[in-house]
Image (tube, grey):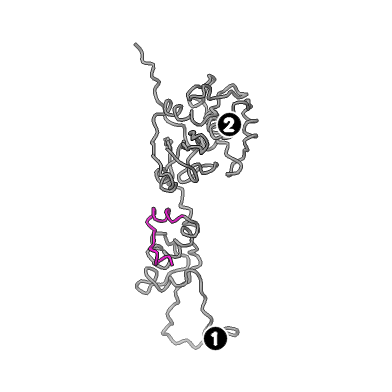
Amino acid sequence: MASCVRALIPLPSFTKMKEHYPGYKHAGGRYHNNHLIDMIGCKRKLLLHDTSALRLSYSFNKVGGEHSLGHDLIHLSRNGIDSVVGTDGLQYIYHPIAYGPFLADKYGYPTISKLHQFDPVSTKKNFWGKQGILRVITYRKIKNLPVGHVALWDCDHFHETKDWISGHSLITVEFWESPDSNCSSSTTRYLHQIPVKHMKQAPTPPSTSVNHQIPANRLLGQSNHPLPVTSEHSSLKNNPPFNQGNQALAPNSQIDLKTLMKDKTFRRKFIKKYYVSNGHLRHAKHRGLSLSKEQLS
């Protein structure tokens, strides 16, 4: 007797999913909810305020082929009917709760992470450096009902949608990684915020050779004792590892974050500015950047 179990297939390319994803207007995308519904051409009677499932369905149908949702109504959750038909004749899942069994049945079981209810940063670290689909399960305060949201996860952030993890009472997150998942070209955001270019160049030692020309610092309009120029990182040039062996730091040198963080002064200023001031001390601790209370004062 032939088996009725359908063979699993890999997820579509993340590049294609991202290309066809109709992102939220308020999150860097192009489509408000009404615009999305008009574009699909489906009836509004059954639709929810949350259109995250419709958006992912649109992406699947645009990728097409074996990833299309097909023409038959989809029945997966307790709601009975979980999809609506568009003007193209294809089905669009509108209920996020139904996406869990749909993805598991077609693409296999996800990697499930039990969430820390009040620590969204600790939750997200399970998926950093990966690309794929996230389904977030939260709970409503009213009637204590489960609510689902589905979206594309792009290395370290949600792609063109709100952050469904932060600010919610979290239960689980289900993650399906794309076969072409690749975050090697992405860079950490805060690394570009470090004003390394403003670091002063170490003074050049005076030359021992005899020069009968007028010294540059005695030219007209310049003082023999100029006022010191201070900046956020001016104290770094005299501290290791920037001046070891009396080697001057060239102004255009490429300094990576690990080297910078070895300096206590820079480390303290960096954490206070980019983590503590924004209320993300837990994020700093996770990355090994935590400081004692004495250091933060």
Of badges 1 and 2, the one in the foreground is 2
Q: Looking at the image, which is closer to me, 207 or 265?
A: 265
Residue visible at 46% across and 58% down?
275
Image coordinates of residue 207 in percent, x first then y, are: 43, 82
Q: Looking at the image, which is closer to me, 63 or 261?
A: 261
Q: Does residue 104 appear to the left or right of 35 in the view shown?
A: left
Q: Is residue 293 above or below residue 213?
A: above
| Numbered range of the magenta stretch | 280-297
Residue visible at 39% across and 36% down?
112
Image coordinates of residue 69 in percent, x first then y, are: 51, 25
First-in-chain label (1 vs 2): 2
Q: Residues within 10 Å of mark 2 (few under 14, many from 20)?
A: few
Residue visible at 51% across and 67% down?
198
Q: Does residue 206 appear to the left or right of 44 in the view shown?
A: left
Image coordinates of residue 246 in percent, x first then y, are: 37, 74
Q: Secondary structure at mark 2?
A: loop
Q: Residue at the top extreme?
A: 1
For residue 92, which quarter of the picture?
A: top right
Q: Amino acid at mark 1?
A: Arg
Residue position for label 1: 218
Q: Is residue 81 above or below residue 30?
A: above
- Work out how far the residue at label 1 is from the one at label 2, CA to CA, in angstroms: 75 Å
Q: Quadrant of the C terminus?
A: bottom left
Q: Secondary structure at mark 1?
A: helix
Residue position for label 2: 48
Q: Residues within 10 Å of mark 1 (few under 14, many from 20)?
A: few
Q: Amino acid at mark 2?
A: Leu
Residue visible at 48% across and 53% down?
189
